[in-house]
């Protein structure tokens, strides 16, 4: 019995989970952690997304850690991480302890980046809904070319974009949109069929949240998106913003 009682506390500890790094270097300025865990639909574009983020890390001198399991979200692993990126995550992927760790991370002044189905994640965790900025509601069948209006061209993520531009992707409708988001890109519903928001259809935004920073883009379903220069620079700016503000 004594041996049993000694073993139980040891088993309840949260050992450090090893993080995989795509490009670690002592010369890099900061580090990000990419989570790709899914409990539902698995996007074929996840690998393309990882390749792009690694490339952005190489070009902008930041380390890119990644995992397809949220088990790595423990305080010890996040000590030197500047932002957590949810790349096409789906479903309920974090347990209560991991949620607490992530809340503390953001409240400590760190950042979050959500890509595409990051809004199709953690529906029962209200705090996360506020962080990502909205929840996925539905989308028209298939993909379509649509026009995007650049609402804010002063942000680090959108300075390169034209006022109006077209791109093909899967177009989400949302619900529980956080009223405090700052809309960067708006989807022109007259340019495709099936949108449900009318004139105001945010598709990319940023906001400060409980001491930290959040950036989300609804683009990212198709693998081809991750080789499009407009999206590459959009995501670059979002990561730099979330990881340290506009100083980057």
Image (cartoon, helix red, strand yellow):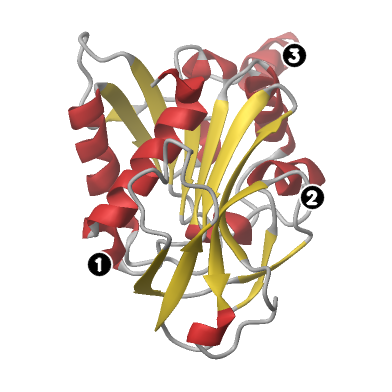
Q: Position of residue 2 (x, y in %)?
A: 74, 9
| 2 or 3: tag closer to the N-terminus | 3
- Label disc, if present, on residue 179 of the rendered structure: 2
**Residue under numbered circle 1:** 224
**Residue under numbered circle 3:** 5
Task: Locate the N terminus and report the quarter of the image it occupies.
Answer: top right
Q: Is residue 184 above or below residue 141?
A: above
Instruction: Indicate left or right for 187 with 49 as reference.
Output: right
Do we see residue 48 in this rendering?
no
Marks 1/2: CA distance?
31 Å
Mark 3 lies on a secondary structure that is helix
Q: Which residue is painted at 69% across and 46% down in the image? A: 181
Between 224 and 180, the one nearer to me in the picture: 180
Q: Write down the quadrant of residue 203 in the picture.
A: bottom right
Q: Position of residue 200 (x, y in %)?
A: 68, 68
Q: Is residue 184 above or below residue 17?
A: below
Q: Position of residue 221 (x, y in %)?
A: 40, 67
Give the crowd class for mark 3: few <14, some 14-19, many >=20 residues within 10 Å.
few
| 3 or 1: tag closer to the N-terminus | 3
- Label disc, if present, on residue 194 of the rendered structure: none
User: How many tags in the picture?
Assistant: 3
């Amino acid at each position: 019995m004594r041996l049993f009682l000694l073993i139980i506390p040891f088993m309840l500890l949260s050992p450090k989970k090893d993080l995989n790094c795509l490009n670690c270097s002592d010369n890099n300025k900061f580090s990000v952690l990419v989570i790709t865990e899914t409990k539902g639909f698995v996007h074929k574009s996840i690998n393309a997304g990882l390749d792009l983020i690694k490339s952005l890390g190489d070009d902008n001198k930041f380390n890119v850690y990644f995992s397809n399991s949220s088990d790595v979200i423990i305080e010890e692993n996040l000590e030197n991480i500047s932002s957590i990126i949810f790349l096409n995550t789906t479903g309920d992927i974090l347990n209560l302890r991991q949620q607490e760790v992530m809340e503390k991370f953001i409240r400590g002044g760190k950042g979050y980046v959500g890509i595409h189905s990051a809004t199709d994640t953690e529906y029962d965790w209200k705090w996360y809904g506020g962080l990502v900025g909205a929840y996925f509601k539905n989308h028209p069948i298939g993909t379509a070319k649509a026009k995007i209006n650049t609402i804010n061209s002063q942000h680090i993520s959108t300075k390169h974009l034209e006022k109006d531009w077209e791109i093909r992707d899967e177009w989400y409708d949302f619900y529980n949109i956080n009223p405090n988001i700052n809309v960067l890109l708006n989807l022109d519903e007259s340019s495709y069929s099936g949108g449900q928001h009318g004139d105001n259809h945010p598709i990319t935004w940023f906001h400060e949240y409980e001491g930290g920073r959040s950036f989300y883009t609804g683009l990212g379903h198709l693998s081809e998106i991750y080789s499009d220069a407009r999206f590459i620079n959009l995501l670059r700016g979002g990561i730099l913003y979330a990881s340290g503000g506009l100083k980057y």
